[in-house]
Image (cartoon, helix red, strand yellow):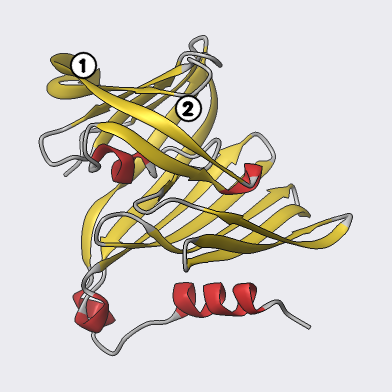
Amino acid sequence: MRHPAVISAVLLLASVSPLAGQATTVDEGRFLITRAGQRIGTEDFTIRRMGGPDRNSFMAKANVVYADVHLSPALRAGQDGSPLAYQIEVKAGTELRERLSGQLGRGRFSARVRTPRGESAKEYIVSDGALVLDDEIFHQYYFLARAELGTVPVVIPRRNTQVAMRVESQGNESISIGGTGVDARHLVISEPGGARRHVWIDDSGRVLKVMLEETGITAIRDELPR
């Protein structure tokens, strides 16, 4: 029997209103993912603002590839970026490593997780205004970049936890995207343990580059957003 959280999350992510054609793409593109200058993966993503009765929500999807590992996240978020439903599937080749489906409601994130070892249910309390930022995925920084500066509660679904991250602005600086110089706002995101993440966004809030100090991983757009 399927868990109610799974059914609700799937319905939220799969539902399409009759006016879904009015959905507006707010960002789409590809990140090239590197470590120490060596390419280790890619992320192709789309973030849309929904049309019709769902116009106050976003749908963000991606296809992330690291060698033979494929991640397929899908996030339905409210106007403020807070998660309504989230699903991610992780495969190594054709083998399923993990499938997580969950939703946020009444201050709790409830999810069902399936792995080769079986299925389990997860539930934990989340703070008001919490955002989703899953590991190894970069387009989701779009929602964190839209948040107010200061402390932001962040849900990390595959870790089954929430942490408080601090967002600070370092002002504007020039970076290169696809060989073209562009002025970008530099945000620094500090984790509770002190590790820092650097995010550069354009004047429309679209993520251009992410750098993780702790792992040395960088994700950068292959070309400027259109």
Query: Which mark sits nearer the N-terminus, 2 or 1?
Result: 2
Residue identifier under label 2: 33
Say which residue appears at 30% left-offset and 43% top-offset: 142
Indicate whether 30 appears above or below 108: above
Specify whether residue 179 is in view.
no
Say left or right for 87 vs 27. right
Give the total of numbered labels.
Answer: 2
Q: CA distance from mark 2 to mark 1?
A: 16 Å
Specify whether residue 181 is in view.
yes
Q: Position of residue 76 (x, y in %)?
A: 40, 64
Say which residue appears at 37% left-offset and 82% top-offset: 16
Which image quarter: residue 178? top left
The amino acid at mark 1 is Ile
Which image quarter: residue 6? bottom right
Circle 1 SS class? strand
Circle 2 SS class? strand
Q: Residues within 10 Å of mark 1 (few under 14, many from 20)?
A: some
Asked if labels 1 and 2 touch by Cβ distance under 8 angstroms, the answer is no
Q: Position of residue 68 (x, y in %)?
A: 69, 39
Residue identifier under label 1: 175
Q: Residue furthest bottom?
A: 18
The foreground one among 40 and 146 is 146
Quadrant into which the C terminus falls? top left
The foreground one among 182 and 206 is 206
Say which residue appears at 55% left-offset and 37% top-offset: 135
The amino acid at mark 2 is Ile
Q: Position of residue 4 (x, y in %)?
A: 64, 79
Quadrant into which the N terminus falls? bottom right
Q: Position of residue 33 (x, y in %)?
A: 47, 27
Say which residue appears at 41% left-offset and 30% top-offset: 165
